[in-house]
Amino acid sequence: MASALFRLLLLGPVLSVAAAAAGAQEAGGLATYRNERHGFSLSYPAGTFTPLPPPNDDGRVFQSRDGSARLLAGALPNLEGMNLAQYRELVLRQSYPGAAIDYAPVRSNWFVLSGTRNGTMFYERVTFTCGGRLINSWAMVYPVAERRFYDRIVEQVARSYRPGAASCG
């Protein structure tokens, strides 16, 4: 499931920094990542984040130049057929145990979890598309000490994010 994907990306070894990502178009200091396979997109400050080499076509990890922050975006099929509430509980349990949640809206096909855990801020948005058959997610994690800087970027990414349904087929 996506939360397991994010846990691996957050806790896994840091990969070498790649050059400009395929599917990213730079304009006015922002780069837009479009995932052709799943159809989602988001924009991020190209001067802050660099794309890491993708393991597959399901998503992408972007790392801050100093390595302290990550932006993750991905999608995958909802193979277990979970509803939104079940999946939200899974994400809370697997990705954010013991976290202090301070923002957590839930709507008909999406939810956000934001808070702190072990000195790290996180913001994760999960959207169900294709009638619940596809899960789109993006998340940003960064040190609490750098919150003033990264909170603005979270807002910018949130405004630009468009969930995808390209693989509904």
Image: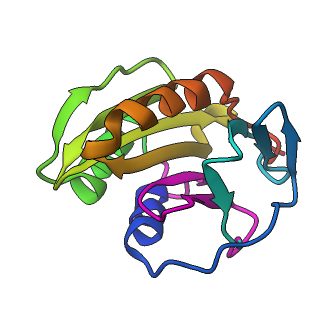
Nearest to the observer: residue 116 or residue 101: 116
Q: Position of residue 122 (x, y in %)?
A: 34, 43
Whether residue 74 appears in this view of the structure is no
Judge by depth and name the residue closer to the eye, 133 or 128: 128
- Where, by quadrant of the figure, is residue 27 drawn? top right
Residue 62: image quadrant is bottom right
Residue shown at the point (60%, 48%) measured from the top left: 48
In the rendered structure, does residue 75 fall within the stretch colored magenta?
Answer: yes
Q: Is residue 142 above or below residue 125?
A: below
Question: x and y percent of residue 162 in the render?
Answer: 70, 29
Q: Residue at x 70, y 37 (%)?
A: 42
Q: Is residue 19 above or below residue 117?
A: below
Q: Say if residue 133 shows up in the picture.
A: yes
Q: Is residue 55 magenta?
A: yes
> What residue span does the magenta drawing correspond to?
54-81
| Left or right side of 3 for 92 | left
Q: In the drawing, does residue 95 fall left or right of residue 129?
A: left
> 144 or 163: which is nearer to us?
144
Q: Residue visible at 49% across and 63% down?
A: 66
User: Which percent across, then down, holds residue 67?
Assistant: 47, 65
In the image: residue 164, left or right of residue 121: right
Which percent across, then down, holds residue 137? Answer: 54, 44
> The C terminus appears in which quarter of the rendering?
top right
Image colouring: rainbow
- The residue under the point 44% across, 17% down is 107
Q: How many marks?
A: 0
